[in-house]
Amino acid sequence: MTITFSGARAFRHRNYRLFFAGQAISLVGTWMQQVAQGWLVLQLTHDPLWLGLVAVAQFGPVILFGLFGGVIADQLPKRQTLMATQTAAMLLAFILFGLTATGIVQVWHVMILGALLGIANAVDMPVRQAFAVEMVGRDDMANAVGLNAALFNASRILGPAAAGLLIGAFDISIAFLINGLSFLAVLASYFAMRDREMRPVAASPRPTSWAEVLANLAEGARYVRQTPRALLSVVIVGLAATFGMNFQVLVPPLADTVLNVGASGFGFLMAASGVGSTVAALWVAFKRRPGPRPIALGAIALGLGLTVLSLSTSFPLSLAAMTISGAGAIAMAVSANATIQLAVPDQLRGRVMSVYTTAFAGSVPAGGLLMGAIASAWSVQLALLIGALVTTAIGVGGWFWLRRIEARTPRGVPAPRPQRVQTAVATADIGAIDPEGSSAGVVSSARPR
């Protein structure tokens, strides 16, 4: 059957259809584990600071080893490498299930398993991104990664809600079991792919030593520093993610001690964030003329949503606030990614994007640890309010900064013309880092996908 809808061109390829089907099942498991793990850590410690420490354990390896994951992506067969990383993640999920089901789990177990998962993520992320073009070819690559991003955000609706209901009805360990089993769908999809239908891409040179890594990063960093719109994108997203995108750290204690809605309520709060994120991702992806203004406006919306959340003791109002916050976070992050993609020359794209993704990923453990410490010392509501006010201020400051950049742009020199293909790529990249974990659930840290 031939698919003619222009928004689903990637489905013309059998290998991609298999990939998408496997992801549709497995990403629900990803978000179930993300919710269950946060709730487990809170029940073990009764201290939100530990949620921040677990985030550090999960994201640290990605920051440290992510650049070398790109080297692996160019040197090893991608499908087989992905099967290895997914198998490792599956085993880690089953180990966590066993520890939880037997009642012997401790928080240090979760941290060690999270760190091992981070190492797997450091390899899986760049390999998976590079694998898209081999499944669908260059013409349909942007459509494929755009569909991946939409699927990732849509799974944030079903996964957390399902996890909350199952934890409330049965036991927290069932979420880890289902997550482990969901990897079988991904492995089956990779196994069923046909090598003869792949489109191998010639390897590009990557840094092979620390000196080359640092030299490449320095060149990308110089470009960001000298390009106003790129610098604005990196700074706003990095700061706003640090102070405002800490849902996995602050929402569990909020649901437990402030709203008193238990694990089921926590799941629905995270699902509400997924609803907002999905709507925002689709809005940005299909805009005719994407631009940088949603970066600042998204940060403002994130801050305002968090302000309402910090002051609310009503569950329905908190659900609405989470929806607004999720929409603002994704609108900001996707628009920032698109702005950089439109500005950067092709020969610097990888290095400049590595600056962006490193800033984004680095904000997760830093922000989680900071906000978790504030919530532990004072209250989760105060931590949310501080993050909300700072994020709103960042958005307002970013708006005036952008207006100055636009005022300085010569009238005869138009900004780079937006292209939908680049917006689609940007949307997908957020799903690639997001997370699990990251924050608004924007950067995926629960496990490699």
Image: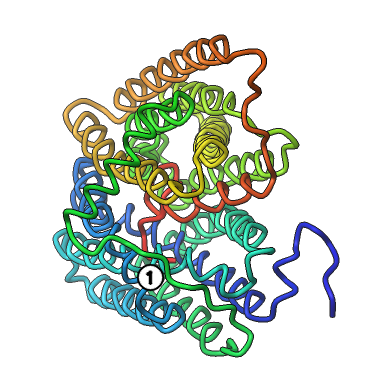
Question: Taking 368 as reference, is 31 above or below it?
Answer: below
Residue type, numbered disc 1:
Ala
Q: Is residue 286 left or right of residue 330?
A: right
Q: Is residue 319 visible?
A: no
Write the residue at 56% across / 23% down.
297
Q: Position of residue 316 (x, y in %)?
A: 57, 34
Of residue 36 and residue 229, the one placed in the foreground of this image is 229
Q: Position of residue 319 (x, y in %)?
A: 55, 36
Of residue 414 and residue 129, the one placed in the foreground of this image is 414
Q: Position of residue 199 (x, y in %)?
A: 59, 78
Q: Is residue 210 visible?
A: yes
Write the residue at 22% across / 55% down.
212
Q: Quadrant of the C terminus?
A: bottom left
Q: How many numbered marks does the figure carry? A: 1
Quadrant of res 66: bottom left
Question: Taking 101 as reference, is 145 above or below it?
Answer: above
Q: Is residue 99 left or right of residue 447?
A: left
Q: Position of residue 183 (x, y in %)?
A: 45, 77
Question: Taking 28 as reference, is 328 above or below it?
Answer: above
Question: Taking 348 as reference, is 312 above or below it?
Answer: above
Write the residue at 49% across / 48% down.
430
* SS under mark 1: helix
Q: Is residue 189 left or right of residue 261?
A: right
* Residue density around tag 1, few if under 14, some if 14–19, many if 20 or more, within 10 Å: many
Of residue 387 and residue 344, the one placed in the foreground of this image is 344
Q: Which residue is mark 1?
A: 73
Of residue 411 and residue 377, the one placed in the foreground of this image is 411
Write the residue at 40% across / 71% down.
174
Quadrant of res 382: top left
